[in-house]
Image: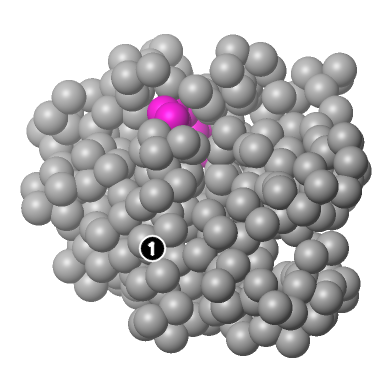
Amino acid sequence: MVTCMNLATMTEKPIEKETTTDTAPTLPIPGFHDQVVDLGRETVGTVRCENPFMVAEKVNVFYGDNHAIRDVTLEIGKKQVVALIGPSGCGKSTFLRCLNRMNDTIESARVTGRITLDGDDIYNKKQDPVALRARVGMVFQKPNPFPKSIYDNVAYGPRIHGLAGDRAELDDIVHSSLERAGLLKEVKDRLEDSGTSLSGGQQQRLCIARTIAVNPEVILMDEPCSALDPIATARIEDLMDELCEDYAIVIVTHSMQQAARVSRRVAYFHLGHLVEVDDTEKVFTNPQHKLTEDYITGRIG
Ligand SMILES: Nc1ncnc2c1ncn2[C@@H]1O[C@H](COP(=O)(O)OP(=O)(O)OP(=O)(O)O)[C@@H](O)[C@H]1O
Ligand SMILES: [Mg+2]
């Protein structure tokens, strides 16, 4: 069976994009080996947002010959959580890593297009990637505390960026970051213990404390709760609620429930395309694209 969808009939409000003579790629749906779907060239929904702080325009990522991200445009605003969802291998982590140039560390990776942070091109030659990553912090799937004390884990960033004038100021930053990450109560009497001696959920909160200690403006989270139990997950989700008062947060998650709980907007990726992005409630209750619908109803996974 061959299914070809006409995006014109599926799209409620298509994004205006430059016309192109390329034909849209026709790709098999994972798990649906007998079906072929026209992915179209336009993202369905609303890629723009009010007061955008980070803007990705026509971003493409290649790993050698593998075209992993295809023409993705997305705006990210402060004080909101955007959730990136989609089947394994669709490019969620790759796109997330573009936002703080973590793909620079992968030799075969090549990024084209434009990404700005508060109007400045983050791929500008003058942009120092280390300074960028202080503004756009990242929390990984597996908590990765440094093999240092709890205190030194949190003090690491403020030290290398010279954020504290003296030890008292550094103490303040460490305490307030641990407090905001919801960990201070549990560790205040053991700040000299190794960060790796904490439980998985505590380690993840330590990594969040380490990230916020340098006052980032954007926080990227790549499946931050996938190794955590429901209680630790709930704590991190509460924390995200608090943190988004100050920051823009972009989270990759495989949990639709989590995306529904924490995010204001949802972006659905499929085979490197940003298929649909819109308000979370709208995507989950009234998806416009067939692929989004298939994914959220569990037919693709
Ligand atoms: N370091 C890398 N080197 C080469 N190719 C990579 C690398 N990382 C990812 N890829 C490729 O890029 C594509 C997208 O992968 P990515 O890890 O971004 O997907 P994902 O949506 O995050 O998947 P998952 O849900 O499994 O984490 C895949 O084809 C993958 O094989
Ligand atoms: Mg990933």
Residue topped by disc 1:
237
Counting from the top left corner in percent of width and height, residue 109 is at 77, 46
Furthest-front residue in this view: 168
Residue at the image position 30 percent from the left and 42 percent from the top: 265
Q: Residue 259's quadrant in the figure?
A: bottom left
Q: Is residue 252 above or below residue 216?
A: below
Q: Check the picture and name the quadrant holding the C terminus.
A: bottom left
Q: Is residue 161 shown left or right of residue 11?
A: right
Is residue 73 in the magenta section? yes
Instruction: Let me know if residue 22 appears in the view.
Output: no
Residue type (three-letter) at the residue carrying disc 1: Glu
Q: Magenta part of the protein: which range?
A: 70-78
Q: Is residue 295 above or below residue 80?
A: below
Residue at the image position 84 percent from the left and 63 percent from the top: 152
Residue at the image position 62 percent from the left and 52 percent from the top: 176
Counting from the top left corner in percent of width and height, residue 160 is at 90, 43
Counting from the top left corner in percent of width and height, residue 49 is at 33, 24
Q: Residue 191's quadrant in the figure?
A: bottom right
Counting from the top left corner in percent of width and height, residue 188 is at 66, 72
Q: Is residue 229 above or below residue 219?
A: below
Residue at the image position 79 percent from the left and 43 percent from the top: 169
Q: Is residue 9 above or below residue 208?
A: above
Q: Check the picture and name the quadrant holding the N terminus.
A: bottom left
